[in-house]
Image: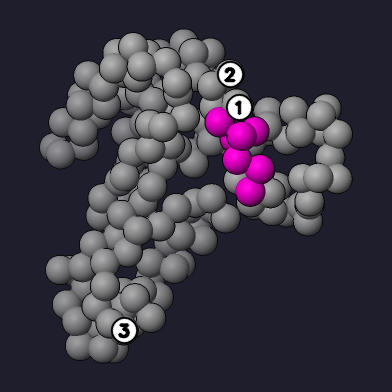
Amino acid sequence: KAGEIGAHVLTSMLNGTLEDVAARIKRYRQALVAAGHDPASHKVALMVHTYVGEDDEAVRDRIRGPFCDYLKSHYELLEHLGKSLGLNIRIEDFSEDDIQTLLTFGVEGFFQGRSLIGSVETCRKHVEAFAQAGVDEIACLIDFNPNHQSVMDSLPHLKSLADKCRT
């Protein structure tokens, strides 16, 4: 429908993989063409959780706790996360240990290409994969880390990533 009416799109990988997003983008671009719109003038933005630093492990260590807390405070995200892992779940049926296990797997999944969490070089590879999938813009979600100074310290690394990706 977005392609048919000529709207721009904001999407995420919360309910699936990058391959799923790529397939939806392809259908969107086809719908733009079918409706007489120029697909090159329409944008697809991908929302991803973002925290960029100097070193992958240091970044992961720094944000693992805050990111787990963030996901835990949004139970609907946990259910979507479980479904994206192929599980038909209801969070209220889980024990605290079950939730912690799901969080651990979920956060690791975000580290493996469902986010921009890591070093500039690691995140650059993710940006390139997003572009290959048809993404035009990235909306960086930095709302999961309550440590203001930590977020501010990461922004120069995010700018470095943006500068490298522009070239």
Report, in whole angstroms, how far the alpha carbon at label 1 lies from the one at label 2.
5 Å
Mark nearer the N terminus (3 vs 1): 3
Q: Tell me how far mark 3 sits from mark 1, CA to CA.
A: 38 Å
Residue 111 visible to an observer of this rendering: yes
Where does the magenta region start and end?
70-76
Screen quadrant of the C terminus? top left
The local crowd at label 3, few if under 14, some if 14 to 19, many if 20 or more residues have their Cα within 10 Å, is some
Instruction: Give the labeled residue for mark 2.
Output: 65
| Residue at the image position 84 percent from the left and 40 percent from the top | 94
**Residue 112, percent across and down?**
53, 34
User: Measured along the vertical axis of the image, is residue 67 above or below residue 22?
Assistant: above
Q: Residue at x 22, y 19 (%)?
A: 156
Q: Disc 1 vs disc 2: Cβ atoms closer than 8 Å? A: yes
Q: Is residue 104 left or right of residue 62?
A: right
Can you identify the residue that label 3 sits on?
4
Tag 2: residue type?
Gly
